Amino acid sequence: MQRAQPQDFSRVLSSMCTEPHPVARDAAERFLATNPGDPGTYETVATLEREAVATLGEVAGLDDAAGYVASGGTEANIQAVRVARNRASTRDPNFVAPASAHFSFHKAADVLGVEMRVAPLDDFTANLEAVDELIDDDTVLVVGVAGTTEYGRVDPIPRLARMADEVDALTHVDAAWGGFVLPFTHHEWDFSDADIDTMTIDPHKMGQAAVPAGGLLARGPELLDELSIDTPYLESTSQVTLTGTRSGAGVASAAAVLEELWPEGYREQYETSQSNADWLAAELHARGVDHVEPTLPIVAADFAADTVDALREEGWRISRTEAGEARIVMMPHVTRETLRAFLADVDRLR
C-alpha cells in the first residue's frame, strides 16, 4: 500500500474531475482535519465556506447567494429535490427532468420518494412540449441541465423556469460541470438569466478544486431552511447539509482556487478547452469520423466498439455515451499534446 500511486491523468479523457490547482492542493492539505459541519468549533473553515459560496454566486449571477460546499453534484441535486418536496403541500410530489439529466436525479427520486418524470430530448436538449405535458399541479420541481454530461448541451433554462412558475414549482439548474465554462459564453443559464431557485455547480470539476468540493446554491436562505435539522449537541443550532461531518479540505480548496482563478483564470481555461474541442472535432471530420459538434468543451466521437476497446487497452481512459460514442472531455489536464497522441493511436488502431 505504501507504494500505491494514484491514477495518472495523462491519458484520462472522459473524467469530469481533474488535477487540483496548486493553491487548491495546498489549502486542502492545511484544512484536512477541520469539520465545516461544526462551524461553531471550526470557525475559520466556516468563514472560508461563506467566501466560497459568495464567489460561486458571482460565477452564477447571484448576489447574496445562500448555499454550501457539498460533497459533489449528487448531493446537491438530491438536496434540490428535497427542498422542493419539503416546501410543497402535495402528498404526491413529482419533478420533471430531461432524459439528459444526471443519474443522481434517479437516486433522489428513490431516496426521497418523489416521482421522477423524464422528458425526451430534441437535438440533445429538453423537449419543451414534452416537459409541458408532464407538468401538473403536483409538480414541485422542474430541472434543466446547463452542460450535459454526455454532450455539453444547455437546456432552454428561461423557458423551463417560466413553465415551473406557472404551477408554483421550483426551478433547479444542474450546472455541475458547465458552471465554470458557461460564464464566458452567450448561453442563458444562470440566476441573472431566469427565475432559478437552486443550482448545482461543482468547484472540483472545471473549477480545479480538490475532490470532494461540490456546490449547492439557492436564491435565498429561506429555501435552505427547508433542509434545516436541529443539532442540539453542537455549538451551532442547526444544519442544512445532507452529510454531517465533512472534511474542510474541499471547502478550503474551493475558496482558495476561486480566489486565484475567478474570473480571468477560468476565462483562459475555457478558451483553451474550447479551442481543443474545436480542434479535435476538425481532426475527426478530416478523418471521416462521425461526431457530435461541441458547443461546450466535450466531443463525442463515433468510433467502432472494437476501436474504443483497443484504445482502452493502450491506457486511454474513455467512457461511452448511452448511444455508444467515445466521450472526450476537455478538462484542464487534457492538452493539445495529449490529443495529438490520442489521435496517433486512433489512426493506428482503427
Image (cartoon, rainbow, N blue to C red):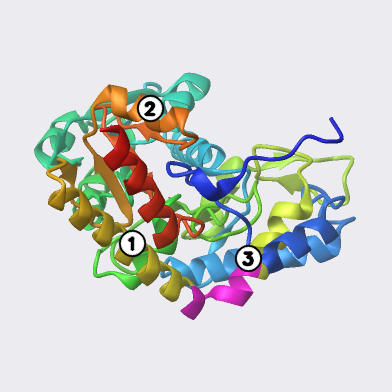
In the depicted view, which residue is nearer to us: 16 or 168? 16
**In-image side of 52 versus 90 (left or right):** right
Residue 311 placed where, x, y %?
Answer: 39, 33
- In three-dimensional space, the C-alpha distance between marks 1 and 3, rounded to whole angstroms, equals 29 Å
Numbered label attached to residue 276: 1
Q: Residues within 10 Å of mark 3 (few under 14, many from 20)?
A: many
Q: Secondary structure at mark 2?
A: helix
Residue 347 placed where, x, y %?
Answer: 27, 41
Numbered label attached to residue 310: 2
Query: Is residue 260 within the magenta segment?
Result: yes
Q: Identify which amino acid the numbered label 1 is placed on.
A: Asn
- In three-dimensional space, the C-alpha distance between marks 1 and 2, rounded to whole angstroms, equals 23 Å
Pointer 3 residue = 52
The image shows residue 324, relative to residue 236, as above or below, that is: above
Q: Identify which amino acid the numbered label 2 is placed on.
A: Ala
Residue 335 placed where, x, y %?
Answer: 44, 60
The part of the chain drawn in magenta is 257-265
> In front of the other: label 2 or label 3?
2
- Is any part of residue 94 visible from this angle? no
Q: Single out the residue that lies furthest toward the bottom.
A: 264
**In-image side of 284 versus 329 (left or right):** left
